[in-house]
Amino acid sequence: MRLMLLFTTLVSMFSLSAQTPRKDSGADGLSIKYLKIGDTIPQALWDLRLDVVGHPAGAKQMTLRDYSSKKLIILDFWATWCSSCIAAFPGLYKLQNDLGDQIKVLSVTYQDRSAIEKFINKSEFIQSQGLKNTFSSVVGDKLLTKYFEKSGIPFTVCIDNRGVVRSLSEPSELNAPALRQMIRDTNAVPIAAQVIEFKRPLLGPYYDNKIHNYYYSTLLPYGRGISQASVFNVDSLQGYKQLVVPNLNVFMQYAVALQHGSNYRPGIARIPSRCILEVNDPDSIVNKLSTIQHFWEYTYESVSPIAYEDKTIYRKMERDLNFYLGMTGSYQKRNVNCLVIRVADPRKLIINKESTQSPKVILNGLMESDGTANGKFLQKAENDYKQVKNAIIGIAVKHIPNLFNRRKIATLPFMIDETGLSDQVSITLPDNINDLEQLKQAFAARGMTLSLENRDLVMLVLREDGYRGDGTVLQLTEQGYVTVQGKEGTR
């Protein structure tokens, strides 16, 4: 049975809490269970001494009870390597400013004091946002995180001054009206509980527990708070298999559905230069993908009899996507432009003398890593690279294609390494990395050639029903190749 749900029913569906108690060893030797919305934190947590960096009074330790006068305490779990965590800081601190002395934002990380002090002093983002003198964080946390089930970070927990957990969500789900409502009404739950794991079919609550053998498939719009981790559950007791592919764009949805096909290539759905979109109005689609958040992102779910083979379930998903989206997806071998790296002259090849140099990438004058595990965050390039806008430093030649293909630092054809080298090189890139001629010159300066050549590659192709083009003239965009009609393009 195929069942499509109305959008108006989705809010309640996605607000279901799928949090599951778990036992873990706490500091006091007692078992710890995940706290859900409505639970009260243990009294011991109020007085737990927490190491802190950036305390407004310069203190090295603090407790949650120090902020019990606030209406809400927002615990914000993060790490320096998590770019989305860092991007959420300005919004969280704006909420704190907007609500005056009613809330306290308290970031929490497992990383140590030295790593966070370095982050506050060197992070270009913290400096540019004016947060250096206001940002504070609990450091070296080993206990707070154990009380809350989360699929990843960033992740926030709102606790009121009674110690009651009021929300479990991503930072983007917090807003001033919702927080004010929680402050006014101690029973209000305006921020939906995050669906951490899919322990049962999403439609399960709509059926009586005595009803069995119900099967369906559905495609739902993007749901806030749902992780992007796909799930394949086999419930032998109830006799079904559940496939959930949550909050992924159409390219990734098809990549999951087509994984049993003969031409399947794992990972290429994430590489724009390996995707082709054949639609009658490509400009509209590309523009929406670039400007509308979560456009073309869906959650697919199917519940099937347990006797079905896994590949049959994935093929059913493929048919469903074709039907719901009005297109077909397939892996096809196509002749497309590629950038091929070769050695121009071994005698002129310039490789790093220090093969152990820590790899770094500089983009727009900002360096992402200083070579330490706890130093991966955007900071201004220093020493010999202060005046460099873009560069790759100490990168093994064989890894350069992945940097361009998967990191998407430029919109360029698929890059292939044919040097056979494992040596590290450093290349000062042009200010405009998309300028192919300047990029060729940058590689030539290090003894390598970068040539544009046609190659037969397996591509993920999405074709709209009723597509009228011939698919021979392609133009590369940040979203992938699109067909161009009546214009000069790239074959």
Image (tube, rainbow, N blue to C red):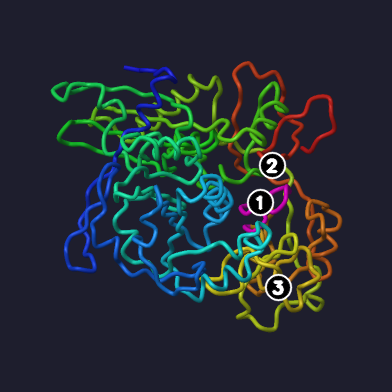
- Going from N to C along the chain, the mark reached first, 1 or 3, is 1
Asked if the residues shown at circle 2 and circle 1 are in contact, with their CB atoms under 8 angstroms apart, the answer is yes
Q: Quadrant of residue 215?
A: top left
Label 2, on which residue?
Answer: 478
Point out residue 189 in the picture as x, y percentages from the top left corner.
35, 35
**Residue nearest the observer in this picture, 67 or 385:** 67
Give the residue drawn at x 25%, y 27%. Answer: 204
Helix, strand or loop at disc 3? Answer: strand
Asked if the residues shown at circle 2 and circle 3 are in contact, with their CB atoms under 8 angstroms apart, the answer is no
Give the residue drawn at x 77%, y 37%. Answer: 491
Helix, strand or loop at disc 1? Answer: loop
- Looking at the rendering, the stretch of residues picked out in magenta corresponds to 402-414
**Residue nearest the observer in this picture, 63 or 463:** 63
Pair 2/3: label in front:
2
Q: Quadrant of residue 441?
A: bottom right
Determine which of the numbered discs, if any, sits on residue 425 in the image. Answer: 3
Helix, strand or loop at disc 2? Answer: loop
Label 1, on which residue?
Answer: 408
| CA distance for labels 1 and 3 | 20 Å
- Going from N to C along the chain, the mark reached first, 2 or 1, is 1
- Count residues near mark 1 (Cα–Cα under 10 Å), then give few for <14, some for 14-19, many for 20+: some
Point out residue 105 in the picture as x, y percentages from the top left corner.
47, 54
- The amino acid beneath tag 1 is Lys
- The amino acid beneath tag 3 is Val
Determine which of the numbered discs, if any, sits on residue 221 in the image. Answer: none
Give the residue drawn at x 67%, y 36%. Answer: 290
Relative to 288, 43 lies left or right: left
